[in-house]
Image (cartoon, grey):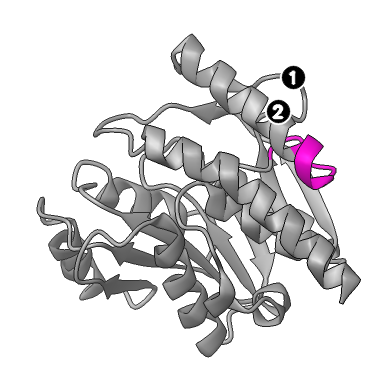
Amino acid sequence: MKALVIVPTYNERENIAAIIKAVLKESAELEILVVDDNSPDGTAKIVAEMQKENGKIHILKRNGKMGLGSAYVAGFKFAIQQKYDYILEMDADFSHDPDEIPRMLEAIKNNDLVIGSRYLNGINVVNWPLRRLILSYFAAKYVRFITGMPLNDPTGGFKCFRREVLEKIDLDDIISDGYSFQIEMNFRTWCNNFRIKEIPIIFTDRRSGHSKMSKKIVWEAIFTVWKLKFRKLKNNDD
């Protein structure tokens, strides 16, 4: 078993060394790839120094702030090229608990995509403002209603894919980039009849640094679900 954890970063110098160490201690079979969007705070420099001491640490340096979705696509292409069996997504800020990784790797043995769900057993989110929690929770309900996907948390970013799923999806055809990227990847996985399993996690708001959430990201997600739905209907008609 060969597994890669992909962590996109932009100005995460306060968290990056700690998250790398926390991830790698979870399993001897894990490696980590940091996809950095030219962070002005020197995040990539910290990773590069750690990389000299540990061959399980990898970094992709990009020329600017190009977005979450394209960062993951770049990471997925790296993972496919290097033939990793399992590819995980997670944030750099400890909102996703690295201690959950072994559970995800166990669940992926009998599934094709495992999603760490904040809403599978009620609401398991810590330290979020009420307004943001309500927005996220009802966004999940909205996505489920519009797309038909039987998922409780279609917007979550703590996930594990089999490589075969990413090989099947045309990564160059992805139409979204912000948090709607998570919706689109789930949707494409579901449309290809892969096995998807949600497991409950507790999501804790970031330890330090600043959230990347914005109104633009929210509106993109709202419109993307309709684009995906209509594209699916068109493909069915064809």
Q: Dot 2 corresponds to which residue?
A: 119
Res. 156 visible in picture: no
Q: Residues within 10 Å of mark 1 (few under 14, many from 20)?
A: few
Q: Name the residue at 27% across, 43% down.
A: 15
Where is residue 2, by image quadrant?
Answer: bottom right
The type of residue carrying mark 2 is Tyr
Q: Dots 2 and 1: beta carbons under 8 Å?
A: yes
Q: Dot 1 corresponds to which residue?
A: 122
The type of residue carrying mark 1 is Gly
User: Could you tell me what secondary structure mostly forms the magenta stretch?
Assistant: loop
Q: Which residues are magenta?
A: 144-153
Q: Residue 73: horizontal and vertical position, in percent?
A: 48, 70
Dot 2 lies on which element? loop
Q: Name the residue at 19% across, 71% down.
A: 63
Q: Residue 189: horizontal and vertical position, in percent?
A: 75, 64
- Vertical order, 124 against 100 (above or below): above
